[in-house]
């Protein structure tokens, strides 16, 4: 509300981002591939606010289809369309919770066809790819930045916006383990605006098919613990094979949490073979070693305590790369402060 000035290309603040939304003729709002609640909640909130203001907007993700059914609770107005139906040349492309162009997946070409592109993100590994960027790596979730943009845009919170924002906040803060008092104050604001945590989180975590019990048991029974990795902090890892990953796509991603619970101060890794020879690797830890550096070195990105990458190879080749990168980052972190020139 404070500014009607449309900013030039480059970094923008929330007021500048709101100005870009306000001048859009139509918009495509996307979250990263394999969307989580922060990506989906951010995108749905932005698109909802645009529509409330009379600007045509849809949400899409660059794969894989369909998006997890558990996220449908965030989309009561049906704003999410398959990527094949996403507008070919939107006036404004908004990229939510996307740290690099690769994370747009099938929709990466929209960066070339959109008149203006705005990234809203909080990854330390963010690599600029859009005409405009609102990036704050200290924000615990992208929805926190989206909330600030909506305040400047001048759309009041309602239950749909509140649920979308709460879901991303809850998920990315690890259930408010991170984010401090500011995250809890925002949560209170969202509950006041109509987000009901009990019903929302029950629907977000979804229901699981009975057959998942046996499939889950098989994955977890084959988990490995390597105590010497990461300078003795240890690595717990497990793999999800193609058949299980295909049959239980929404459920399998949750297993990294179970591995993390047994990893102590060490690192948990879930290696999922999403297609023959193509792997998606999720990493979780305490932040030491910095897993965003490990994942970035392997072609992905993320946060110090939660990161991931996608890569072709075999299980053993990926594990070899992972052990080597964990050793490298752990050794780098142990070096004298004077040699740590890669952080600012
Ligand atoms: Mn996020």
Image (spheres, helix red, strand yellow):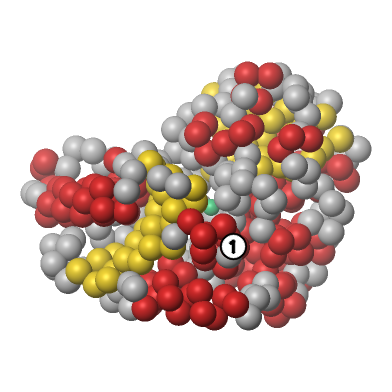
Side (left or right) of 207 relative to 231: right
Q: Residue at x 40, y 75 (%)?
A: 220
Residues packed near mark 1 inside 10 Å, few (<14), some (14 to 19) or many (20 plus):
few
x, y percentage for residue 319?
A: 26, 54
x, y percentage for residue 86?
A: 76, 34
In depth, the one of 206 and 329 nearer the eye is 206
* Image quadrant where one finds the N terminus: top right
Q: Is residue 200 above or below residue 245?
A: below
In depth, the one of 245 and 19 nearer the eye is 245
Residue 169's image quarter?
bottom right
Residue 130's image quarter?
top right
x, y percentage for residue 297?
A: 29, 40
Q: Is residue 151 above or below residue 56?
A: below
* Image quadrant where one finds the C terminus: top left
Q: Residue at x 49, y 47 (%)?
A: 275
Q: Which residue is mark 1?
A: 247
């Amino acid at each position: 509300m404070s500014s009607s000035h449309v900013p030039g290309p480059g970094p923008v603040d929330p007021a500048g981002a709101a100005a870009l939304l306000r001048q859009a003729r139509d918009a495509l709002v996307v979250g990263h591939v394999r969307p989580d609640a922060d990506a989906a909640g951010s995108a749905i909130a932005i698109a909802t606010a645009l529509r409330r203001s009379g600007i045509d907007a849809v949400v899409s993700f660059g794969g894989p289809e369909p998006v997890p059914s558990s996220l449908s609770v965030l989309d009561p107005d049906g704003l999410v369309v398959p990527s094949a139906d996403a507008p070919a040349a939107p006036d404004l492309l908004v990229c939510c919770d996307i740290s690099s162009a690769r994370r747009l997946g099938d929709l990466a070409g929209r960066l070339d066809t959109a008149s203006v592109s705005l990234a809203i993100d909080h990854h330390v590994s963010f690599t600029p790819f859009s005409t405009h960027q609102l990036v704050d790596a200290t924000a615990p979730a992208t929805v926190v930045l989206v909330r600030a943009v909506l305040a400047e845009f001048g759309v009041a919170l309602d239950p749909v916006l509140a649920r979308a924002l709460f879901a991303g906040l809850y998920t990315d803060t690890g259930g408010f383990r991170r984010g401090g008092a500011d995250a809890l104050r925002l949560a209170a604001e969202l509950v006041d605006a109509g987000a009901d945590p009990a019903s929302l989180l029950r629907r977000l975590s979804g229901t699981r098919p009975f057959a998942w019990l046996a499939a889950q048991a098989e994955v977890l029974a084959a988990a490995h613990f390597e105590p010497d990795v990461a300078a003795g902090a240890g690595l717990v890892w497990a793999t999800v094979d193609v058949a299980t990953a295909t049959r239980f796509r929404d459920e399998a991603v949750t297993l990294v949490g179970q591995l993390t619970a047994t990893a102590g101060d060490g690192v948990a890794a879930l290696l999922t073979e999403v297609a023959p020879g193509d792997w998606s690797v999720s990493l979780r830890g305490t932040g030491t070693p910095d897993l965003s550096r490990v994942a970035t070195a392997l072609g992905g990105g993320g946060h110090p305590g939660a990161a991931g990458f996608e890569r072709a190879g075999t299980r053993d080749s990926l594990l070899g790369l992972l052990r080597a990168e964990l050793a490298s980052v752990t050794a780098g972190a142990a070096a004298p402060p004077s040699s740590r020139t890669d952080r600012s």
